[in-house]
Structure formats: structure tokens, C-alpha cells
Amino acid sequence: MRDINAQQVLEHLNLTIAWYGHINTADQSTSIPQNVLLQDSVQQSSKQVVRKAFAFAREQAAFLGKQKSANGRSAIPAGQASSLEQAATIANERIQGLQNQIESLNQQIAKDRHRKLSTLLSQRDTLTSDLAFAKLTQSTLRDMLQFASGSDNSGGLLGRINLLANSDSIPAALSDAPTPAAAAAHAASPEAMFHPESAGIFPLIANCYELSRARGQIKGLLTETTKLNTQVTKVMAPLRANIRALISEGDSIANAATTETDPNKLSTDRQQIERISARFKALSGPIVPLREQSIAIAATQGALEQWREAVSGQLQTVLGYLAFRLGTLGTAVLLLLIVSEIIRRATFRYVRDTRRRRQFLLIRRFVVGTVAAIIAIIASVSGIGSFATIAGFVTAGLAVALQNVILSVVAYFFLIGRYGLKAGDRVTVSGITGQVIEVGLVRLYLMELAGAGTDIHSTGRVAVFSNSVIFQPSALLKQAPGTEYAWHTVSTTLVPETDPENARKLIGSAVETVYKSYQSAIEQQHEAFERSANIQLADPVPVSRARSTDAGLEISVRFPVEIQRMSEVDQKVIDSVLKRIENEPQLKLASGGFPKVLPSA
């Protein structure tokens, strides 16, 4: 008959401990207080599973110990045990010899401090490594001898069982202390419960994710519980087979004894029945807790099924409320858009003045945006109380900035009045000269201009002001929408005898050669900006100028450059100018006239 060995007992125990660890680390969140009682039921039944597993392991360890006592202590043949003892003796002698050699070398090292010191140190290091290996061999042989002597059978198994029982998570399973889920159930207050009927979209989405994750965890625990139940059945199978065999053997002997008349044979049969009874009693010790463990696993599985059904029901409820919230939000937004479209069409139909039409459309966008934001906030937060809290914070923030907002809105009506500003006007605000692009409800946009007299040019930037700047000046500068270029100027100084017109054309053509490589990109940006701003500006092309200075004839070329390629283009421009000067005999650099590139004002 085949018995369960120590390795199988430890495997079963480790599998049970791993399963209990996963049960114990399931979702401990108290955001779903209605589930903590089911969770506590699962953990209580899982404790019973662990207790019965340890009871089975200890009973089986005792059974194996009795078998060992009956069969003798030697686990391996005597010849092998003798060989192991001889090897252990040789290992002990080798360790002693190496230690003596190391002590001798230490004495020599203490005496010799000069020529042979490095050699002696190397020899000692080698012997030390050899000694460590010899001790490792000695330890291995000692373990093998311990196993051969039988001291690592049932006694070792019981020690490992006790070691597992004292691990981090198992003492809690073997005690009657309340589980964290039970403590959370008692500590949870009605206010802590989640109420989907009054929750907003974001809390509902978060709760859906939490419930989905919990359901996935429970599904995984059910799978592990099924595997553990299969393992229990597998471990129980040989015990059942042995018990059935003992019962069959006992019945056979009893049936034969009814017709037997020989006293000696009857005495032998009695001894066999006593032996069978003793073995049956020994086998019944492990199988009883194992059967109880199977019952506890079934109870845990039932509790997990109830828990999963409860979580699934809650998930369906939350999903229903979420769909209702999203549907309500979508309907409200759709109605708002329909009303907005009706207002827009009515504005185009009945408002003939272009400026006043823009005012109505701007007010429509502001009102629609505000109402949409309020609808989104109401749909997203949990209940009116949360909305009131958020509204309080928003009101406090608006109270701080309300003065500037009111000034900007009031200033807007001044700016668009009969003598106000319109797109294309050139104005100077807070020291910034520019061309008006748009007058918004709270902001004024200017295309910044630079230069003086007839030399007025766009800098490629838009100046953005708060409308309240007409009462309290402040300004903000940013790049014009749709443009990604700026203006640079390359300048070089030639000898005074150089022909200015010829030098200007030659240096300008050198810059234009580089500019043509990215001219199309600059022109596309320029055209896009003109279309979006509904204004026309001079084409962005290189412009060269010449002027006499004390150092010589200064030639400067102003050219547009893509912002992302500034360094690359500037270097190419300098190289092109130097190459043109080298190839043209009439162009000679003055002292300190090396070309340099600077941003244009």
C-alpha cells in the first residue's frame, strides 16, 4: 500500500498557505461596506481550511514517525552510510590540515615584512579559498549523514511544519482574532457607504473600476480554491485506498475465521486483525482533518460565489446609474447645442450690422460655455452638497478676480463703440505699436510692428492685452497665430572703397540663396496668417541695406528664419556670405568685419 510521504505533505501545506495568503490579501477597501460581511465569512472559512491542513500535516508526520520507528532508522544501505562516514572523516582531516598551513603562513607573514610578503599573502589567500570549499563539502556530507541516520524524516517534517506555522501570515489564521474585514464592518459608518443614486459621473466610473477589479479578484480566488480542492482530493486518494484495502483484508480474515478450527491459525488471524486495527487507527488520524479541510474549502467556495454575485449585482446597479447620468448629460448638452444653433441662425437672420452680430455671437458663446460647464459640474460631482462646495470655492475664486473681469468686459464695449477699434487699425498701447487683429470680450490682440517712419515691419508677434488695459496698463506678447518664424539680420563690414550698391546686391543674393531653401514654408505660414487674421502684410523676403561707418561699409540683410531652425539657418547664412566674399575680388572684409547674425528689433 502506498503512503503519503513528507514531500507530498509539505507541498500540500505550502499550496494551502499560498491560497490563504491570496484570500487574506483580497480587496480590504471599506468603500463597499455592504460586502465586508461576505468577505469576513470567506476569511473565517479560509482559516478553518488552514487549521485543518496543519492538523492533517501533524497527524501525517506522527504516522510517518511511527512507521520509521517500526522499520528502523537507516534510510540508506549500510555500505553507502560507511562510505559517507569515510568521506566525512577525510573532509575533517583536510580542514584541519588547511587550518594548520594557514596558521604557519600567518606566522611567516608576521616575521617576513619584505621580499616574500606578497608571495606568502597569495599562498594564504589560496589556502583560505580552499578551506572555505572544504567546509562547504563537510557541511554537505554532514547533512547526508543526518539524512542517512533517519533524523531528518518525521522529526524534520514536524519541525518544518512548526516553522511554517510560525511564518508571518499563519499565526493570524490559527488564532481566533477578528479579521480586518470584520473590524472594517464594525467601524464603517452609514456615511461611508457609497450611494450610486446620488453620485456623479466620475465617482460612478471610479466605483465601476473598483467593483470590476474586486470581481476579477474573486474570480481568481475561486479558480485557486478549485485547484486546492483538487489537491485535497488527490492527497486523500491514497489514504482512502489504504483504508479500503485494510477493511477488505479484515473482512477476509473475519470470514475465514468463522470456518477455521485450528487454534494456532485463529491466533495468527487475531494478531493480523489487531495489526490491521492499529494501522486503520493510524490512517484515520490524517484523513479526518483532511476531510474536514475539504468541507471547509467547499464552504469557502460557496461564500466566494455569494461574494461574486453580490459584487456583480452592485456593478450592474452602478452601471445602470452611470448610463442614466451619461444619457442625461448627453441630452442636456444636445438641447443646449440646439438652442445655441437656433440663436446663431436668428442672429444671422435678424441682425444686419456686422459688428453687432459679432457681439451677439460672442455673448452666445460665453453663455453656452458657462451653461455647459455648469451642467458638466452638476453631472460629475456627487450630489448637491458636493456641487455647493465646489460652487463655494469657485465663487471665492471669482470674488478675487472679479474686478479685472468686470473692467475687461466694460472696456470691451468702449473698444467696439462707434469710435472704437476694428481689425486692421494700427494703435499703440502701453508702448507697443501694432495692428489690431481682434477685439475679444476680455482681450485685445495686436500684430506687433517695429521700425520708424516708412520702415515699419511686422515682428512676427501678436501683442495680447487685457481690455482693462485702457484703465490699468498691462501687456502680453506672443507669436502670431499660424506663424513659426522670426526676423534676423546678418551684417558684415567691408573696406571703405567697396561699391555700396554692388556689395548690397551680392551680399543680399548670398542670403537669398539660403532663404530659397525654406521660402515656401515661410510663405505658407504668412498666407495662412493673412487668411486667419483677414489682413494683408508685406511678403516676408530678405531686405539688404548699406551704410557707411567709421570702420568701413556696413552691409546688413534682414531675413525671415524658421524658429525651429534658427541656429542652422544662421550658420548657413554666414557661410554663404563668407563664400560670396571669397569668390568676389571686389568684396574685401574690413578689420573686425566678420559676418554676424542678430535678432531684428
Image: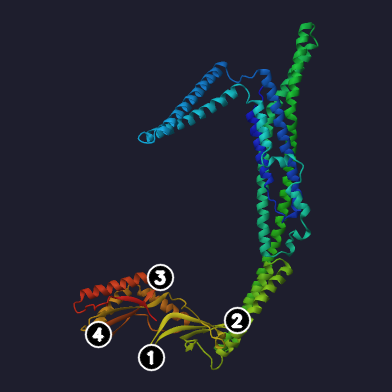
Q: Is residue 508 left or right of residue 401?
A: left
Given contact means CB atoms under 8 Å apart, are the residues at marks 2 and 4 in contact? no
Mark before the other along the chain sequence, 2 or 4: 2
Amino acid beneath label 2? Arg
| Type of the residue with mark 3 | Gln
- 106 w.r.t. 429: above or below: above
Work out how far the residue at label 3 is from the one at label 2, CA to CA, in angstroms.
Answer: 40 Å
Q: Quadrant of the C terminus?
A: bottom left
Front residue of this view, candidates 126 and 37: 126
Q: Which mark is residue 501?
A: 4
Q: Earlier in the sequence, mark 2 or mark 1?
A: 2
**x, y (%) of residue 318?**
71, 59
Q: Which residue is mark 1?
A: 453
The front one of 499 and 133 is: 133
Q: Amino acid at mark 4?
A: Glu
Which residue in the protein does label 3 denote? 564
Q: Earlier in the sequence, mark 3 or mark 1?
A: 1
- Disc 1 element: loop
- Image position, residue 490 (x, y; %): 32, 77
Which residue occupies 75% across, 36% down? 295
Q: Which mark is residue 344?
A: 2
Report, in whole angstroms, how far the alpha carbon at label 2 lies from the one at label 1.
44 Å
Q: Secondary structure at mark 2?
A: helix
Front tag of 3 and 2: 3
The answer, for residue 4, to whether it is visible in the render is: no
